[in-house]
Image (spheres, helix red, strand yellow):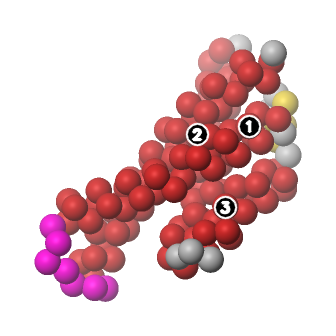
């Protein structure tokens, strides 16, 4: 039962972390669209595209792989980082086959979302105690 009680907190922290990373990717899309490849598409549309693509491709791995793995591989303040990093990088490696740029974003995003999730979860755990 303790696993299920902890899972929803980790999933909430993961969702917040993924959203923060998606905002960053949206901003990266705007910078890329304005500097590297000039476009007539409005910056707001480019931002929304990057944001939504990140959420679309990141939500399932984050909620169904990352959060349960984090919950299972952490106890108190201790986290088993190596297996967790492998777990969050594998979806990005698989995505490289479909799209190189999105695969690279996922390879960077997995560990970034994991670290943000860990920081949020630790902060919430300290307040609960």
For marks 1 and 2, the one nearer the N-term is 2
For marks 2 and 3, the one nearer the N-term is 2
The residue tagged 1 is 68
Q: CA distance from mark 1 to mark 3?
A: 15 Å
Of the two numbered discs 1 and 2 in the rendering, the one whose residue sits closer to the viewer: 1
Q: CA distance from mark 2 to mark 3?
A: 16 Å
The residue tagged 3 is 91
Query: Which numbered dot is residue 23?
Result: none
Helix, strand or loop at disc 1? helix
Residue extent of the magenta highlight:
36-42
- Give the percent coordinates (x, y) of residue 110: 63, 57
Residue under the image location 56 percent in, 74 percent down: 98
Residue under the image location 82 percent in, 28 percent down: 76
* Screen quadrant of the N terminus: top right
Within-10-Å neighbours for mark 2: few <14, some 14–19, many 20+: many
Query: Residue 37 magenta-drawn?
Result: yes
Can residue 105 be seen here? The reply is yes
For marks 1 and 3, the one nearer the N-term is 1
Of the two numbered discs 2 and 3 in the rendering, the one whose residue sits closer to the viewer: 3
Rendered image quadrant of residue 111: bottom right
Of the pair 129 and 108, the residue shown nearer to us: 108
The residue tagged 2 is 14
């Amino acid at each position: 039962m303790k696993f299920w009680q902890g899972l929803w907190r980790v999933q909430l922290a993961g969702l917040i972390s993924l959203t923060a990373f998606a905002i960053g990717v949206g901003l990266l899309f705007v910078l890329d669209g304005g500097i590297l490849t000039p476009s007539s598409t409005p910056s707001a549309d480019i931002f929304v595209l990057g944001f939504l693509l990140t959420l679309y491709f990141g939500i399932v791995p984050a909620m169904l792989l990352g959060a349960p793995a984090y919950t299972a591989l952490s106890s108190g303040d201790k986290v088993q980082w190596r297996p967790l990093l492998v777990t969050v990088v594998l979806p990005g490696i698989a995505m490289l086959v479909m799209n190189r740029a999105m695969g690279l974003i996922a390879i960077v995003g997995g560990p970034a979302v994991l670290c943000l999730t860990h920081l949020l979860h630790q902060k919430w755990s300290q307040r609960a105690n």
